[in-house]
Amino acid sequence: MDDMLRNPADGTRLRILAWLAEPDTAGRGLTADDVAVRLGVPLPAARTHLRLLTALGLLRPTGQDDGLRYRRDEIRLAEVTQLFEKGW
């Protein structure tokens, strides 16, 4: 899983997932604006990272439109991690 999420984003997606694992962030989730500000990237770049992680099933968006908040899907993360640990 580490290699898949690291390329080509130089660890950005892993940082997003790690940030979402922090207790204060895990409960409320993150918006694309939060990610853009924290990582110092343009908003479209933040949205792209969040959309990719969502497409992989690693994030669950809630809310609508500009109010979208993203949280980790812990079950899916565990499944994917297990696949990579088995040498998938």
Image: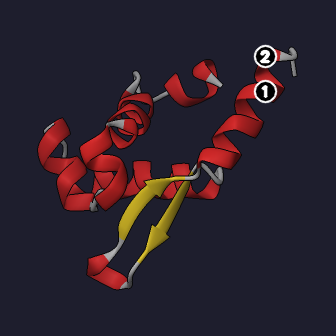
- Seen at 12% across and 47% down, the residue is 37
Is 18 displayed left or right of 45 in the figure?
right
- Label 2 near label 1: C-beta < 8 Å? yes
Is 47 displayed left or right of 6 in the figure?
left
- Seen at 24% across and 46% down, the residue is 24
Q: Residue tagged by mark 2?
A: 85
Image-quadrant location for residue 38: top left
Residue 52 picture location, percent across and down: 53, 51
Is residue 29 in view?
no
**Three-letter code for the amino acid on which mark 2 is drawn:** Glu
Q: Residue tagged by mark 1?
A: 82
Residue 55 picture location, percent across and down: 62, 57
Residue 18 picture location, percent across and down: 39, 31
Q: Quadrant of the N terminus?
A: top right
Q: Quadrant of the C terminus?
A: top right
**Mark 1, secondary structure of its residue:** helix
Local crowd at mark 2 within 10 Å, few (<14), some, or many (≥20)? few
